[in-house]
Amino acid sequence: MTVTLFITILTVGSIISSLLTEAIKKAYANAGKEYSANVIALVDAFVIGGGVTSAVYMLMGIPWTVNNVICLVGMIVTTWICSMIGYDKVIQAANQIKDIVKDEKETTDSTSN
């Protein structure tokens, strides 16, 4: 597996896994049940990271060598890490940008008065 292929699969897998993790967390919260976000992210990483990588191997005819199995395990771990921090950090960054824009607008409005 090339580095480019690994990064491509990681990007797609992390996006899907982060969104799925957040959807499951919302479902548990709406049902009033307790959950562990990290365990949900881990299960999602096994399903998404492992499943997507396996599908790419099969569709592209990549042989199941020891190195590629190691890359599969690495994909699961990196997808897990990305899904644990990805969605929450994106939302946090969006809120921070929104606050900065809001503060700049308020500053501009008060200066023009």
Image (spheres, rainbow, N blue to C red):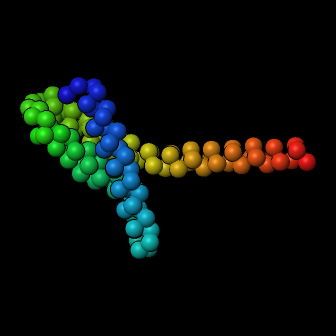
Indicate the position of residue 108 as horizontal and vertical percent values.
Answer: 81, 43
Indicate the position of residue 106 as horizontal and vertical percent values.
Answer: 79, 48
Indicate the position of residue 76 as horizontal and vertical percent values.
Answer: 26, 42
**Residue at 49%, 50% in the rendered image:** 88
Q: Nearer the viewer, residue 75 or 57?
A: 57
Q: Which corner quadrant holds the N terminus?
A: top left
**Residue at 64%, 48% in the rendered image:** 98
Tally of marks: 0
- As drawn, the residue found furthest toward the right would be 113
In the rendered view, does 85 fall on the left or right side of 71? right
In the rendered view, does 51 fall on the left or right side of 19? left
- As drawn, the residue found furthest toward the bottom would be 31
Q: Nearer the viewer, residue 29 or 91?
A: 91
Q: Is residue 64 above or below residue 14?
A: above
In the rendered view, does 102 fall on the left or right side of 64? right
- As drawn, the residue found furthest toward the front would be 112
**Residue at 31%, 32% in the rendered image:** 7
Q: Is residue 16 visible?
A: yes
Q: Where on the picture, by quarter, is residue 65?
A: top left
Q: Nearer the viewer, residue 71 or 98?
A: 98
Indicate the position of residue 81 as horizontal and vertical percent values.
Answer: 37, 42
Q: Is residue 79 visible?
A: no
Q: Where on the picture, by quarter, is residue 12?
A: top left
**Residue at 57%, 47% in the rendered image:** 94
Q: Where on the picture, by quarter, is residue 70?
A: top left
